[in-house]
Amino acid sequence: MLRQIEGSKAIAETVALCRPEVVCAYPISPQTHIIEAVGAMVKAGTLAPCEFINVESEFAAMSVAIGASATGARAYTATASQGLLFMMEAVYNAAGLGLPIVMTLANRAIGAPINIWNDHSDAMAVRDSGWIQLFAESNQEASDLHVQAFRLAEELSVPVMVCVDGFILTHAVEGVDLLDQSFVDSFLPPYEPRQMLDTKAPVSIGAMVGPEAFEEVRYLAHLRQLDALERIPEIAREFFESTGRESGGLVRPYRTDDAETVVVAMGSVLGTLKDAVDARRDLGELVGVLGVTSFRPFPSEAVRDALAHARQVIVIEKAFNIGAGGVLSTDIAIAIHNEQTLLRTVVAGLGGRAITRRSLEKVLDDASRDELAALTFLDLDQEAVDRERARMQASRRSGPSAENLLRDRGTASPKIPA
Amino acid sequence: MFQIRIHGRGGQGVVTAAEILSVAAFDEGRHAQAFPSFGSERTGAPVVSFCRFDDRVIRTHEPVMEPDAVIIQDVTLIHQVDLFSGLSPDGYVLINTSKSFSDLGFGDFFDQYHIEHLMTCPATEIALEHLGRPLPNAALLGGFAALTGEITWDAIDKAVREHFTGPVGERNAAAVKAAFDYVASKLKEAARASTN
């Protein structure tokens, strides 16, 4: 049913349709309304049987999800930013153990400096953990992806993270066509665990594995991710055939067929980009957009195909590898690996800085004149950076840069006199 | 596409107003989007929310940079926040105050704007009368409907009753109607004055 609904609530309702049996979370910021809404449904008895477990930390949240999943329960949790980092060890364990937990990651920046706003730094911090990471472009896709995520996770025994832009999507009220229970029940069969803690057939899960088999266990995990490269588009196609909606899949090309310049991005910025590209197309410019939905596993072949004819590829990323450059760009570079394509990285939207259509237009203007630098920071206040560099040069005791920049902007209280 | 920016203070229902407006537009069969400006919300701190609606699917997720209408829930923000940034000369302004627009001391700031698009509405007084609490958000949506004609009073009324159920819904709906009637009568007065 089509409803005008907040992203978090649409996700919560969809998660409930997936009939999770254990939902655990640490109910503090950075959380979203997702957990709040799921908790309310459990309390009201509309989501049953389901146990909602308030845990004492994010680390405990993932640990409880691991325990629940190991007993054969369908387990779900949600987190963001520092919360994800706090559960980091357990995040790796969930993947290493092959437990099909589904987690919503409401993407937010990571401190310091303290920041609660959206970017993709949190997802990038766990990109090597062995979780599948799917990025939603809209709240419709964010909701739909959760059903596909449970299906994929349980088929392959791999945990899946659904990455949804914090605030920009989670707090936006938009029209979302919510699925109905009968469809979800037919699309998502009951969970049949490959491994399970069962007193009738005792096993241990989580053995210590030495050099004699560790590499093989890791390689098997890699093979499961490669299997996911096959299954992600198949599940998306099946979903499309039933719902008519193009949610999920590996990549989503938009007007790329004859495009000389293709902009690659993940998440909610894709909508704004498509509007910008349509305007350019009206002027005859050959530009397109490539959305990467599956970041892990990384769909190198699909990316290569979509970018095969592009002369210039611009990767817009909401995170970056400090001291190196783009994160997504590196994967794109490996996927296309040739000398002819101009690859440009634009770091944008860090810590919640709005990515405006106007700024994206400027990127496309610069690109059309071949004036886009290899690495650009969108809307960077270079003068403020220069002033801080000068302060650092002028005095050894220049103090904390974050506070200095706030003072430079006039948004912090004056320095306390010594 | 019609885009609205709502300015107010934490606790005044700024975010709720944008959401209700988007639901009203949705109920009228349009595509709509509402979202808050994102910050650490504190009671009394300046808060901004956005709403846009269109007959076509809305793909963009940028903040509203060039609003077609600005709703000011708290008149004390006038000298603190850049309230009218990006507002086009055809844009609408609705300010919650019992003063008239010309008494707000804008000088020649709005000389290029359509005078019939600039309006004040004593929404806090209306809210106090109907709700017993100084929450101007729903009332201002009634005023917005009358001022712009971009959305019907019916749709606002229905969305407000959907959001605030029971007696609270009734009281908010009464505030919506009072503000709608107030702005509509002010517009009529102004139209009469300009034809005379």
Image: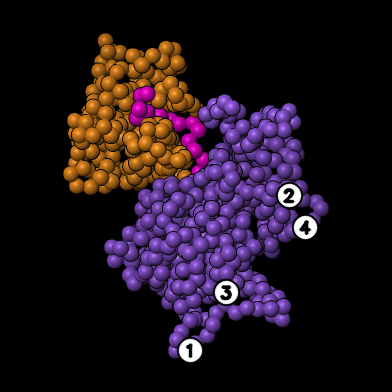
Chain colours: A purple, B orange
Tag 2 residue: A324
**Left-right relation of B126 to A78:** left
Tell me where residue A406 sits by quadrant: top right
Q: Which residues are magenta?
A: B61-76
Residue at 54%, 82% (x, y): give it. Answer: A204
Eyeballing the image, is A21 above or below B9?
A: below
* Residue that badge 4 annotates: A337
Horizontally, residue B43 falls left or right of residue A374, namely left
Q: Secondary structure at mark 3?
A: loop
Instruction: Find disc 1 in the rendering and name its residue.
Output: A201
**Left or right of residue A111, residue A30 in this image:** left
Residue B102 placed where, x, y %?
35, 14
Q: Secondary structure at mark 4?
A: loop
Which kind of residue does numbered mark 1 sit on? Ala
Gap in angstroms between the C-alphas marked 3 and 1:
18 Å
Assess whether mark 2 and mark 3 are in contact (beta carbons under 8 angstroms).
no
According to the picture, the residue beneath numbered tag 3 turns out to be A97
Membership of B173 in magenta stretch: no
Q: Chain of mark 2?
A: A
Q: CA distance from mark 4 to mark 3?
A: 33 Å
Of circles 2 and 1, the one toward us is 1
Image quarter of the N terminus of chain B: top left
| Residue A184, visible in the rendered structure | no
Q: Respond whether the residues carrying marks 3 and 1 are from the same subunit.
A: yes
Mark 3 or mark 4, which is nearer the start of the sequence? 3
Neighbourhood count class around disc 4 (C-alpha, 10 Å): few under 14, some 14–19, many 20 upward? few
Mark pair 4, 1: CA separation: 50 Å
Identified by mark 2, the residue type is: Ala
Task: From the top left corner, tell me how far across and down residue A285 is, in percent.
Answer: 66, 41
Kind of residue indicated by mark 3: Leu
